[in-house]
Image: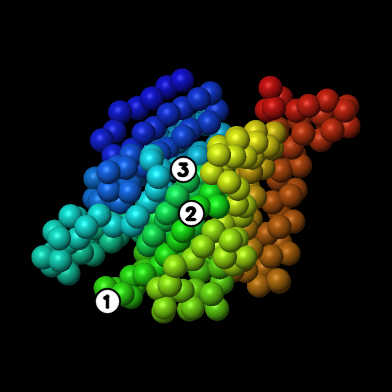
């Protein structure tokens, strides 16, 4: 097991899996500029390391992430437009890098996820939540909007539900989060880690190049016309079929054995 030292997060690599844990439990893992920069560094390390196959994002203690840190907000309120823009771009870049990472990301939502916390889990591929978790997009209550996180939340829950929860700021229970697609599965807290581990093991049986291509496929096809999608999808599957991984996967299937990446 390999651990890297950060001040606001815990980075643990266990063989092919990396666990990134938000580690400010005394403030319910609220994020500040330091946490944003440390998360950016951690996800860059994941991207560069070919041995890493899956990332699990979670929170230390009772909460997943309570949004922006109040003490940080006390500083931000005095920032100029240019300073606010710079910090907002850093958060936007982090969320995009999580979303576009060519490896599967799983949010293990162990507790409350508010504002940016909801954004973090929305940028992940799959979110599995505790039945005790609560969610919120309450920025309007303090005269703001969920701007940087909106592209990912809207993709998760759709425009109709985004309008409802962005405008009202009302809390969302775990059951409701499941109903609207904000999370993929909900389990009792004591079963959460076991269920996430089962999901991670399932992801590890998939070809890593195929997984990366799947993420690209979903990202691009959703904004393509059907006409453009014809050529793009045909080219992708043709490339994968002649690739080393595609050849190994199809051969393993025909020979009734497991492909090499599952070993």
In three-dimensional space, the C-alpha distance between marks 1 and 2, rounded to whole angstroms, equals 25 Å
Colouring chosen for the image of the structure: rainbow
Q: Residues within 10 Å of mark 3 (few under 14, many from 20)?
A: many
Is residue 61 shown above or below 32?
above
Instruction: Residue 76 in the image: state x and y as whole percent.
Output: 17, 62
Instruction: Residue 119 in the image: state x and y as whole percent.
Output: 43, 59
Kindly tell me whether residue 60 is visible in this rendering.
yes
Q: How many marks?
A: 3
For disc 1, the marked residue is 143
Residues 113 and 149: in front is: 113
Residue drawn at point x = 33 percent, y = 57 percent: 67
Name the element at disc 1.
Answer: loop
Is residue 198 shown above or below 29?
above
Name the element at disc 2.
Answer: loop
Callout in the foreground (1, 2): 2
Pointer 2 with pointer 3, Cβ within 8 A: no
Name the element at disc 3.
Answer: strand
Callout in the foreground (2, 3): 2
Instruction: Residue 106 in the image: state x and y as whole percent.
Output: 54, 45
Mark identifier at residue 133: 2
Q: Is residue 52 left or right of residue 119?
A: right
Residues 9 and 91: in front is: 9
For disc 3, the marked residue is 57
Kindly tell me whether residue 38 is visible in this rendering.
no
């Amino acid at each position: 097991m390999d651990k890297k030292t950060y001040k606001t997060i815990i980075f643990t690599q266990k063989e092919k899996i990396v666990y990134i844990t938000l580690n400010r439990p005394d403030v319910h893992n609220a994020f500040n500029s330091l946490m944003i920069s440390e998360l950016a560094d951690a996800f860059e390390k994941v991207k560069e390391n070919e041995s890493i196959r899956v990332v699990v994002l979670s929170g230390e203690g009772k909460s997943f992430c309570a949004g922006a840190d109040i003490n940080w907000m006390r500083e931000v309120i005095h920032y100029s437009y240019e300073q606010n823009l710079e910090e907002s771009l850093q958060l936007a870049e982090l969320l995009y890098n999580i979303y576009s990472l060519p490896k599967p990301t799983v949010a293990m939502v162990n507790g409350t996820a508010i504002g940016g916390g909801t954004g973090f889990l929305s940028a992940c591929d799959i979110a599995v939540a505790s039945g005790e978790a609560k969610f919120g997009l309450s920025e309007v209550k303090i005269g703001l909007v969920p701007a940087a996180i909106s592209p990912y939340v809207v993709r998760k829950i759709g425009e109709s539900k985004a309008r409802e929860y962005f405008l009202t700021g009302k809390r969302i229970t775990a059951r409701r989060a499941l109903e609207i697609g904000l999370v993929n599965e909900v389990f009792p807290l004591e079963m959460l880690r076991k269920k996430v581990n089962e999901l991670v093991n399932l992801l590890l049986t998939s070809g890593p190049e195929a997984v990366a291509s799947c993420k690209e496929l979903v990202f691009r096809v959703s904004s393509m016309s059907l006409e453009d999608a014809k050529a793009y999808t045909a080219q992708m599957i043709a490339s994968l079929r002649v690739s080393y991984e595609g050849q190994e996967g199809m051969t393993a299937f025909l020979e009734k054995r497991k492909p090499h990446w599952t070993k």
